[in-house]
Structures are given as structure tokens and as C-alpha cells.
Amino acid sequence: MIKLFQSWWKKGDRPASSENLSVADLLENNIPEHVAIIMDGNGRWARKRGMPRNMGHRSGMKAVKRATIAADELGISVLTLYAFSTENWKRPKEEVDYLMAIPQEFLALELDELVQKNVRIRMMGYTKELPDHTIAAMKEAIERTKNNTGLILNFALNYGSRREITESVKELAHSVQAGEISAEDITEEMIQSRLLSSGLPDPDLLIRTSGELRLSNFMLWQTAYSELWFTDLYWPDFGREHLFAAVAEFQRRTRRYGGLSK
Ligand code: IPE
Ligand code: IPE
Ligand code: MG
């Protein structure tokens, strides 16, 4: 009877807040290899407190640190964080300027610890439009962590999925034009290997905060079979326990990839 109750309890939809999950509990089941997060709600978090939007972005940096440490604790291989989209340039200059200063500010505070924690930093996005100081900060972080072998912390910065797919297809079209391949020979792998995420596994788990239920041009190709997890929390309020709750929920899902469950 107790056993029956336990298995029901494990599968049941307990609210995330009542879950007191430990690393050990989670490690008993499969851990997602790649977790991607759409970090949303910084502006609303600040507004709710009567503060300027940029204070929300500043506070969001602490959540980045918490998520990184929690992902590392669980032995997740890749944590991709959507930091700035190719559409976010539409925002007021003051906000864009601050968002472009964040990598510098964040890395000045945290890079030493990330190096020490064996974290490897990567970037996924278009550098062409980024200010020099933003590129310099990212380059330094990538360079200083290039020999690390632990968690890959992948920042999606000036990232847009439609642009990435378009670029990939364009490259292939050039190859066809040059007579290197025929159009008939184009495969999914050829498109995939030309995406900015090349070399990384597809996200197993995609998290979006702030209550919005959309992808906002994020990893459209790569999330074809990702498990999606949404929360109403604003990004600055996201912590270790929420990542753990998302992973616990992931562990209760059955992934079928169009087939049938075992
Ligand atoms: C996410 O928070 C950060 C970025 C998009 C850069 P937002 O700035 O989108 O915050 P909301 O959604 O307006 O609350
Ligand atoms: C998505 O959030 C982009 C990032 C989190 C970096 P947005 O706030 O830009 O998305 P929309 O505009 O609500 O779809
Ligand atoms: Mg938003």
C-alpha cells in the first residue's frame, strides 16, 4: 500500500513549491544533458518593485549564477541561457546599452569562480552587431575557460533562430551553386551542423520564466523534441529549487519522439 502510494506520489503533479528535492533524489533518475532557459521577466520584476527595468536585468545576473551552480551540481552537461535576442535591439537605447554591458559586469564578478568550477563558457549568436566591449568580455571568458571540461555555459547573445536557419540554408545554397553538392543531397544533418549550436546536443529541457508561453525565436530547430517547462516566476526570482523542480518534472515525462512508449 505504501509502495503504491509512493509510486503515485512520484508520478503525481505535486506543486513545485512543495517539492523539497535534493541532488541525491534527482540523481536517481536521468538528468537532462542540455537545459536551455529563456530568462524572461526582468523588466516586470523591477516594475513590480517600482524600480527601473535595468535593475531587473542586474538582479537577473544573480539568478544566472544560481542556475549555473545548480546545473553544475546536477551534472548537467550544457546550460544555454537566452540573454539577448536578435529582436531585442528594438528596445530603448538605454536598456540595450545596459544589456550589452552585462557580460562585462557579470564576468568581472564571476569569471574567477567559473574558471575554478571547471565551467566552460561558450557563446551562440551574431557578433557583428555587438559593441566591442561586449565581444571583448565574452572572448576573454571563452579563452580563459577553453580548457575546462565541466559544465558548458552557453550564452545566446544576439541570437535568433530564424536568422540561424536562414544562414545555414544560405551556406548550403552556395555549395549547391558551386557544384560541391546537389540540392537532392541536402540532409537534416547538413542543416543542423551549420547552426550556431553545432557541436552541442539538442536541449532536452527548455525552461521559460515569466509566464509567457512562447519561444520568441529561440532554438526553433533544436527544440523539436525538447520537453518544455514554464513557470510564472520572473527570472530574478529563479533559484536552485526551481531548476530542481523543472528537472524533477522532466524525469516524470515520457519522451516518445513520435514512437510508442516502452
Ligand atoms: C528578459 O527580461 C531579459 C531580456 C529579454 C534581455 P525582459 O527584459 O524581457 O523582461 P520583461 O519580459 O519585459 O518583464
Ligand atoms: C525573449 O524574451 C528573449 C530573451 C529572454 C533574451 P523577450 O522578452 O524578448 O520576448 P517577447 O518579446 O516577450 O516574445
Ligand atoms: Mg520579456
Image (cartoon, helix red, strand yellow):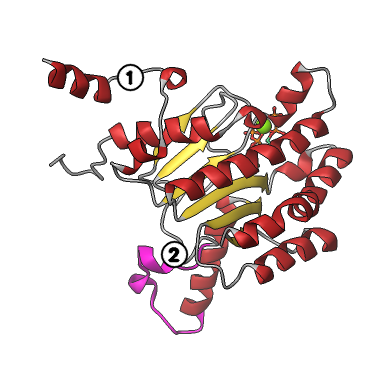
Question: The N terminus appears in which quarter of the rendering?
Answer: top left
In the rendered structure, which amino acid carries the disc numbered 2? Ile
Which residue does the image show at 18% across and 17% down from the upper left?
Answer: 5
> Helix or strand or loop: what does disc 1 sit on?
loop
Residue 78 counted in the magenta span: no
Which residue does the image show at 64% across and 37% down from the upper left?
Answer: 63
Eyeballing the image, is 53 above or below 143? above
Question: What is the C-alpha distance between the residues marked 1 and 2?
Answer: 38 Å
Question: Which residue is nearer to you in this view: 159 or 70?
Answer: 70
Q: Quadrant of ligand 1?
A: top right
Query: Which residue is denoted by mark 2 in the rendering?
Result: 191
* Residue 20 in picture, x, y percent from top left: 42, 25
In the picture, the disc for residue 13 is 1
How busy is the neighbourhood of tag 1: few (under 14 within 10 Å), some, or many (20 plus)?
Answer: few
Q: Would you say the beta carbon of the disc 2 residue lies within 8 angstroms of ligand 2?
A: no
Question: The C terminus appears in which quarter of the rendering?
Answer: top left
Which residue does the image show at 25% across and 20% down from the upper left?
Answer: 9
Quarter location, residue 65:
top right
> Helix or strand or loop: what does disc 2 sit on?
helix
* Residue 70 in picture, x, y percent from top left: 52, 42
Q: Sequence order check: which comes first, mark 1 or mark 2?
A: 1
Report the residue that reaches farthest toward the bottom. Answer: 179
Mark 1 or mark 2, whichever is nearer to me: 1
Question: Which residue is nearer to you in this view: 164 or 203?
Answer: 203
Quarter location, residue 14:
top left
